[in-house]
C-alpha cells in the first residue's frame, strides 16, 4: 500500500480549494480499470473491451470478465463498449473456457477507487470524503483531490459526497502550512502552498522559486519571492530549489521587484513596531536604530552581496519617516558604495546621504502606482529584502554582460 496509509483514522477538516483556475468547460475525470489486480489507466470512461485488454497487456486468446459480487460474472467480447462507471474491476479467462453469461446479474458490480498508487474495492458507489479516508486509512492531514484530465484537479471537502460515476481516481494532497512546526509533511502527490493570500497546488515535492511565482500567476522577472521559516524570512532565488517535504517550511510572500530608478554597537535610539522587531530579531540580523540630523534610520550591518558585486563588508540604511508604517519607506542607502566587478555604472546611485558623518550611496528606487506601498503587508524587514533584490538584479547584469 502507499506511504500515506496509517493505522489510525482521525477526524480532520481539510480546506477545500481548486488546483489552478477552473476552465469554462467542465474537465473530464480520469478513469482506471483494475484487471487481475493490476491498475490500468484508460483514456476515458467508455472504452471497448479490446482497449482494456490492450492497455492491460492481455493476450488475444483471453477475454475480460466484469467482476460482480456474484458467481455469474459477465464476459465481454472484444467489440463490446464498456462503461467503467458500471464497474471497473475485471478478471481474464481463456477464450476457450469463457462462460456463456453476457447478461448482468442482479448483484452489484465491484468498484475500485484509487488514491495515488493504492486501490480499494467496494460495491458502494456512493461514498463520502470521510468514508474514503477510512477505506484507505489516510493520514489525518492528507487531503484529497479528484484527478482530472486537465490541470484542474477538484478538491474534495470534508464529509462531501463522493460518487463513483463522477470518477474513481484521486490524488493525495498536503497543505504545507499545517506542518510548519517541528514535524515534516507526509509524502503526497500534490502540495498546497500559500503565496501571499493565494493558495496553489504544486505537483512535485521540489520546486524552484521561478516555478512558484509562475504557478501564482506572477512575473518572475518583476517579483521577489521570500520564504517564511519559523520567525525568519529568507529570499528565494529564481533557480533555488525549495524542498516542500523539509521540516519548518511555512509559506511564501512576494514583493514587487520593479521600482522606478531614482559600526556595530546595537543602538536602539527609537522604537520600531513590534512586528519589525520580531522579524529583524528572528532573522538574526545585526541591526540598530539611530536618530541623526538627517532623520531616523534603521542600519543593518554585514548584508550579503551576490556574486558580480565587489565583496566588501557592507551595511544598508533605511530611512524611517515620521508617519511610518502608514507612510511608505523609500530607497535604500549603502556604505561603502556598492560596486560592480566589471566596473559598470549602476543607474540612479550617483547621489549620497551623510549619516553620522559618513557618505552612504543612495539607490533611488521607489514604490509606484503599479506597485504601491501596502500598509500591514510591507515593513522595514520587507524593504530590507527588497533592497537585497536590487543588488541581485544588478549583479545579474554583470553575469549577462
Image (cartoon, rainbow, N blue to C red):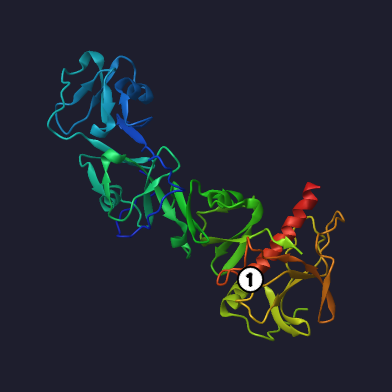
Residue shown at 81% from the left, 60% from the top: 347
Q: Quadrant of residue 100?
A: top left
- Quick one: 388 or 37, which is closer to the camera? 388
Pointer 1 local density, CA inside 10 Å: few below 14, some 14–19, many at least 20 = some
Task: Evaluate whether residue 237 shows in this view.
Answer: no
- When the figure is inspected, residue 280 is found, relative to residue 372, above or below; the finding is below
- When the figure is inspected, residue 224 is found, relative to residue 93, above or below; the finding is below
Residue shown at 66% from the left, 82% from the top: 322
Residue 148 placement, left or right of 272: left
Q: Position of residue 288 (x, y in %)?
A: 70, 79
- Quick one: 287 or 253, which is closer to the camera? 253
Task: Evaluate whether residue 278 shows in this view.
Answer: yes
Residue lying farthest to the right in this orientation: 343
**Quadrant that contains the N terminus:** top left
Q: Quadrant of residue 163?
A: top left
Q: Position of residue 377 (x, y in %)?
A: 56, 69
Residue shown at 17% from the left, 34% from the top: 69
Residue 140 placement, left or right of 356: left
- Quick one: 26 or 266, which is closer to the camera? 26
Q: Position of residue 358 (x, y in %)?
A: 84, 77
Check disc 1 and report the residue beneath it. 381
At numbered mark 1, what does the secondary structure look like: helix, strand or loop? helix
- When the figure is inspected, residue 46 is found, relative to residue 298, above or below; the finding is above
Residue 238 placement, left or right of 335: left
Tell me how many marks there are: 1
Q: Position of residue 60 (x, y in %)?
A: 33, 15
Residue lying farthest to the front in this orientation: 369
Amino acid at each position: 500500500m502507499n506511504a500515506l496509509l496509517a493505522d489510525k483514522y482521525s477526524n480532520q477538516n481539510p480546506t477545500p480549494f481548486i488546483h489552478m483556475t477552473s476552465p469554462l468547460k467542465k474537465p473530464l475525470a480520469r478513469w482506471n480499470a483494475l484487471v487481475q489486480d493490476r491498475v490500468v489507466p484508460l483514456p476515458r470512461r467508455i472504452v471497448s473491451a479490446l482497449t482494456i485488454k490492450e492497455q492491460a497487456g492481455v493476450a488475444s486468446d483471453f477475454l475480460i470478465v466484469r467482476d460482480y459480487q456474484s458467481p455469474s460474472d459477465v464476459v465481454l467480447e472484444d467489440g463490446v463498449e464498456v462503461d467503467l462507471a458500471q464497474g471497473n474491476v475485471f478478471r481474464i479467462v481463456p477464450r476457450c473456457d469463457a462462460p456463456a453469461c453476457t447478461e448482468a446479474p442482479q448483484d452489484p458490480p465491484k468498484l475500485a477507487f484509487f488514491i495515488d498508487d493504492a486501490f480499494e474495492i467496494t460495491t458502494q458507489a456512493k461514498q463520502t470524503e470521510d468514508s474514503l479516508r477510512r477505506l484507505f486509512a489516510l493520514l489525518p492531514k492528507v487531503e484529497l483531490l479528484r484527478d482530472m484530465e486537465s490541470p484542474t484537479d477538484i478538491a474534495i471537502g470534508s464529509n462531501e459526497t463522493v460518487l463513483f460515476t463522477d470518477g474513481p481516481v484521486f490524488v493525495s494532497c498536503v497543505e504545507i502550512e499545517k506542518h510548519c512546526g517541528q514535524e515534516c509533511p507526509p509524502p503526497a502527490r500534490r502540495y498546497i502552498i500559500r503565496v501571499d493570500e493565494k493558495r496553489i497546488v504544486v505537483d512535485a515535492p521540489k520546486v524552484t522559486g521561478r516555478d512558484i511565482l509562475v504557478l501564482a500567476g506572477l512575473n518572475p522577472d518583476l517579483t521577489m519571492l521570500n520564504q517564511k521559516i519559523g520567525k525568519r524570512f529568507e529570499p528565494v532565488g529564481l533557480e533555488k530549489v525549495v524542498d516542500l517535504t523539509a521540516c519548518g517550511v511555512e509559506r511564501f510572500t512576494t514583493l514587487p521587484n520593479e521600482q522606478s530608478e531614482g559600526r556595530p554597537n546595537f543602538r536602539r535610539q527609537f522604537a520600531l513596531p513590534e512586528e519589525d522587531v520580531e522579524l529583524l530579531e528572528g532573522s538574526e540580523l545585526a541591526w540598530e536604530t539611530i536618530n541623526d540630523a538627517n532623520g531616523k534610520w534603521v542600519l543593518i550591518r554585514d548584508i550579503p552581496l551576490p556574486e558580480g558585486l565587489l565583496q566588501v563588508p557592507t551595511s544598508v540604511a533605511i530611512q524611517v519617516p515620521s508617519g511610518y508604517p502608514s507612510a511608505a519607506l523609500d530607497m535604500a542607502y549603502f556604505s561603502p558604495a556598492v560596486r560592480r566587478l566589471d566596473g559598470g555604472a549602476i543607474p540612479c546611485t550617483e547621489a549620497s546621504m551623510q549619516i553620522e558623518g559618513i557618505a552612504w550611496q543612495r539607490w533611488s528606487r521607489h514604490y509606484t502606482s503599479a506597485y504601491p506601498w501596502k500598509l500591514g503587508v510591507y515593513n522595514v524587514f520587507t524593504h530590507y529584502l527588497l533592497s537585497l533584490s536590487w543588488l541581485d538584479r544588478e549583479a545579474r547584469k554583470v553575469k549577462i554582460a
